[in-house]
Amino acid sequence: MSEAWKNLDLEGEGLQSANLRLVKLMKRRPRAYGLLVLFPLGLHRAYLNDARGAWAYRIATLAAVTALWFGFGWVALGLLGTMLSVALYDIRWIEDRVALINKTLRIHLYKAKSTAPAPKGFRGRYTDDSLDDYVKLKEQERGGHVLPGKDPALNSRSRAPSFAEQEAMLKELAQQSRQNKPKP
């Protein structure tokens, strides 16, 4: 039941269908390492889309078996030793190859999903050519953040007023409003 979500057919144009397709296509490290155990057959290289490397393993295995059959034990042993050393290198190669394949799959799959053109008038990021215009535009805007000590409303203090100070300010404002109130 927990794996049932993988069989859902969501082949619309949404991100969820792209993610499901990506999960099916991605290469898995444990599987590649499991196939590495059978390195004389080159299955791990075939799984990671390296046909040339897979066939190199197979040909070397066939050459070693043939050399052993005809009595050239040292040649067979040398070929097997070379294959073993390359298989030891492949332990690290698998990490890099899986990461590269999965990244390429992700890029390809998500680029295929984003076929909408850029909005009309879109100029991309600001480049150095228009940086002066950008700076002027931004200087005209009044942002929500002001550097400490630069806001005229807060120039006199660097902290928020205490409760007692707020009460005193409210009393003073109330008193001023009563004094400025016209008498009937």
Image (tube, rainbow, N blue to C red):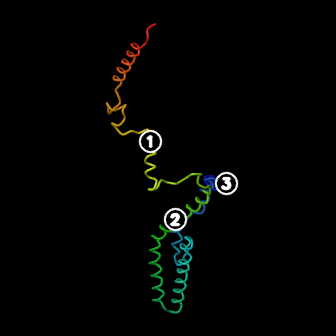
Q: Which mark is residue 69?
A: none
Residue for badge 3: 12
Residue for badge 2: 30
Badge 2 marks a residue whose secondary structure is helix
Please name whichever residue, 93 or 43, is drawn nearer the observer in this view of the structure: 93
Q: Residue at x 36, y 40 (%)?
A: 147
Tell which tag, 1 or 3, sits nearer the viewer. 1
Amino acid tagged 1: Gln
Q: Is residue 130 above or below residue 148?
A: below
Badge 1 marks a residue whose secondary structure is helix
* Residue sticking out furthest to the top: 184
Residue for badge 1: 140
Which x, y percent locates residue 37? 51, 73
Q: Earlier in the sequence, mark 1 or mark 2?
A: 2
Amino acid tagged 3: Gly
The tally of labels here is 3
Could you tell me how far apart the alpha carbons at marks 1 and 2 are, in whole angstroms? 57 Å
Could you tell me how far apart the alpha carbons at marks 1 and 3 are, in whole angstroms? 44 Å
Q: Earlier in the sequence, mark 3 or mark 2?
A: 3
Which x, y percent locates residue 61? 53, 83
Tell which tag, 1 or 2, sits nearer the viewer. 1
Q: Earlier in the sequence, mark 1 or mark 3?
A: 3
Badge 3 marks a residue whose secondary structure is loop
Q: Residue at x 47, y 67 (%)?
A: 96
